[in-house]
Amino acid sequence: MGYGADVRLPDVGSPEKLMAGFFPELFGQTMEEADILEARVEQRAPRNAAASTVPLTYYFYELSKRRRVAMTATGNRVFILSLAPRSSVGGRKHVGEFKQIAESFDVNAAKP
């Protein structure tokens, strides 16, 4: 894979490997095993997809402290959405909205 490659998440690593790698960058601390409450993999056709476009793989995470992360990769880039409440009250009050925002994460395909 070189310049201009169309790297996808499965090419980079498993959901657990990617979260362990990005967790310190996202949350400023090392990840503990108990931090991942749920990890889910989903295939989605990109919004701008031509009929022949390969669907993108998305990883969705529910993490401790009501944090949510969604990620995908295309065109040699990993795209990450990270959501964390400012307080535990905000986390409890907006848990449904955080889930909805994470689930709506979508990235245009780099190549058809």
Image (cartoon, rainbow, N blue to C red):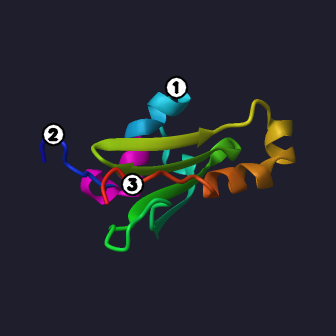
Q: Amino acid at mark 3?
A: Ala
Residue that label 1 marks: 28
Q: Which mark is residue 2?
A: none
Give how far apart the Cα atoms at labels 1 and 2 are: 30 Å
For label 1, count other residues whose C-alpha is less than 10 Å away and answer few (under 14), some (14-19) or many (20+). few
**Residue most extreme to the bottom:** 51
The boundaries of the magenta stretch are 9-20
Q: Is residue 6 found left or right of 64 in the rendered image?
A: left
Residue occupying the point 55% across, 42% down: 81
Say which label, 1 or 3, has the lower sequence index. 1
For label 3, count other residues whose C-alpha is less than 10 Å away and answer few (under 14), some (14-19) or many (20+). many
Give how far apart the Cα atoms at labels 1 and 3 are: 30 Å
Q: Which mark is residue 3?
A: 2
Q: Amino acid at mark 2?
A: Tyr
Instruction: Name the residue nearer the viewer: 97 or 107.
Output: 107
Is 10 magenta? The answer is yes
Q: Amino acid at mark 1?
A: Gly
Residue 86 location (% of width, % of height):
75, 30
Say which label, 1 or 2, has the lower sequence index. 2
Is 69 magenta? The answer is no
Say which label, 2 or 3, has the lower sequence index. 2
Instruction: Name the residue nearer the viewer: 101 or 20.
Output: 101
Residue 18 location (% of width, % of height):
38, 47
Residue that label 3 marks: 109
Residue occupying the point 51% across, 32% down: 26
